[in-house]
Image (cartoon, rainbow, N blue to C red):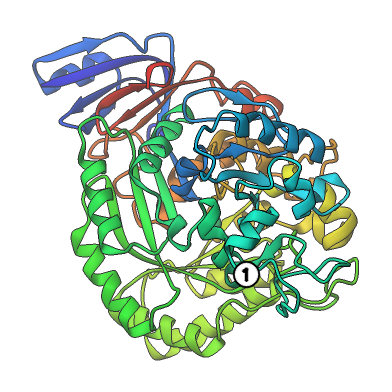
Amino acid sequence: MITIYEARKIITMNPARPHASHVAVREGIVLGAGPLEELAGWGAHQLDRRFADKVLMPGLVEGHSHASEGTMWRYVYCGFFDRLDPGGKLWPGAKSIDKVIGRLVEEERKIADPAKPLSGWSLDPIYFNNKRVSRQDLDRISTTRPIGVMHASGHILNVNSKALELGGMLRAGVNHPGVPLGADGLPTGEMKGPDAMTPVGLHVGFNREMLAADEQGVRQFARLCVRKGVTTAADLANPLPPPAVEMMLRVAAEPSFPARIVSLRLFRNISPADLVARALELRAMSSDRLRLGIVKAVADGSIQGFSARLRAPGYYNGAPNGLWYVAPEQLRELYERALAAGVQVHTHTNGDEATELVLDTIEGALRKHPSPDHRFTLQHCQLANAAQFRRMVKLGMCVNLFPNHHFYWGDQHYSLTVGPERAERMNACATALRTGVPLAIHSDAPVTPLGPLFTAWCAVNRRTASGRTLGENERITVTDALRTITLGAAYTLKLDSEIGSIEAGKRADFAVLEDDPETIGGERLKDTRIWGTVQGGRVFEAATI
Ligand SMILES: [Zn+2]
């Protein structure tokens, strides 16, 4: 059966025919986009006018998020900014530590079982003049129930005294760089990094396998995708244990599952040889709606957490240089084996020193294993300078930059972390495009909210939360931004032959919009209203998802 959808406007991203009024779909595939008379040539069809007053564009592609965003919403939202949950409820931001505590108290009262932990997420003390949260703060909620609140970065966990006690950490003499101690010699309750977080995390709902979202989390994540016009989303760092893969394949195959998930296997607790073998195994298990077989490596930490590796002149406030998350030798072995086997690797770098290490390592690996079209991608890569973008082009690499940072942490980058000049060159989208590096942009949800049109707004305006324009000369046009959140992201996932544009032969994946993002204006791009999506020819309305 052929369905021809009529729309107010169709933005196709097909350079030969950028706009259309109708699109014909058969069995989830686009037959063509153009005038009705032309499309009628395909034969018997049904004309569907439900989008006659809407704007269609290719289904948005989120090139770096985590399906665990869906799991997080089972916990109490403690973020500073307003945020939409998968059910469509807007949670107001908690603007002070007292507000965070107040919200947790309210939720605590609703839990009948006294042993059940209370979990919160998306805390960031950098907004409270960097005043740290202590176990005493959380003890105001309860001294008998274990409580844990994950930071927005996902790299720090605050717990109360009961959780420390259950984790065997409420004692003097703890000597670990990730466990700060109070004046009384006991841990303050702030646990930094996986080593410190794990023993207490188990007791407050955050265990090691958290990045492998559970069944309910995956479904919630896909609902959120529909609300944001997303039809394909990367789940960028999943340990992918066999039961999780089995579950995700099953859930994604459900007829009502509305998104395509590209899940990358995280390089952690596994040798490069085993990882590459596992990636090939996973690739063979892929389905249309669950794509597997790409690898994710992490080179350093985060800039706002001062754990990113920076080259000279280092952190603006004098903080010591950040942390390496992987040994250079391990990275070299991974790249060589992956290139030899034809496995794609995405690598997280935040600081420019980490980016430089990865560029050097890939250059060496490519000399041993010359590989056309490998599309190794740098993720975040926030501090890359022009010289590094030039190297990326020569090495055949892609980059996925993180413009949401300008809004969420731009003021802090300007005044605290990297200082004014480097804050203005962070996430240099214009330089990347000018240099010819294939570009994607992302949210890293749950670190910042999922929403490619918001991310596009960030890249177009580079506005901080306080209203400063951070890097006027690195702003990109709306046209470039819209291309980046569709074909650009699809390219980094090697899916641009299937998705990212509306043209003959491609998957029938559309974002269905109430407003026209091409004419709404850069200032208002983030306010573009989203009706829902069409995914593989199936219609999903956000209001009823
Ligand atoms: Zn991430």
Quarter holding residue 212: bottom left
| Percent coordinates x, y for residue 491 in the rendering | 41, 54
Rendered residue at 62%/21% (across/down): 520
Q: Quadrant of ligand 1?
A: bottom right
Which is nearer the eye, 458 or 103?
A: 103
Rendered residue at 22%/56% (across/down): 286
Which is nearer the eye, 316 or 188?
A: 188
- Answer left or right for 71 relative to 47: right
- Of helix, strand and loop, which one carries label 1? helix
| Percent coordinates x, y for residue 127 in the rendering | 81, 45
| Percent coordinates x, y for residue 315 in the rendering | 84, 69
- Answer left or right for 459 relative to 230: right
The answer to whether one can see residue 278 in this image is yes
| Percent coordinates x, y for residue 471 in the rendering | 80, 49
Rendered residue at 43%/87% (across/down): 333
Which is nearer the eye, 347 or 477?
A: 347
Residue 3 in the image: above or below residue 354: above
Rendered residue at 38%/32% (across/down): 17
Residue 492 in the image: above or below residue 217: below
- Answer left or right for 243 relative to 176: left
Quarter holding residue 536: top left
Question: Which residue position holds label 1?
Answer: 196
Does the residue tagged 1 have its C-beta within 8 Å of any atom of ligand 1? no
Q: Quadrant of the C terminus?
A: top left
Residue 293 in the image: above or below residue 160: below
The answer to whether one can see residue 15 in this image is no
Mark 1 neighbour density, 10 Å: few (under 14) some (14–19) many (20 or more): some
Q: Quadrant of the N terminus?
A: top left
Label 1 sits on what residue type? Ala
In the rendered picture of this protein, how many numbered marks are placed on residues? 1
Residue 518 in the image: above or below residue 289: above
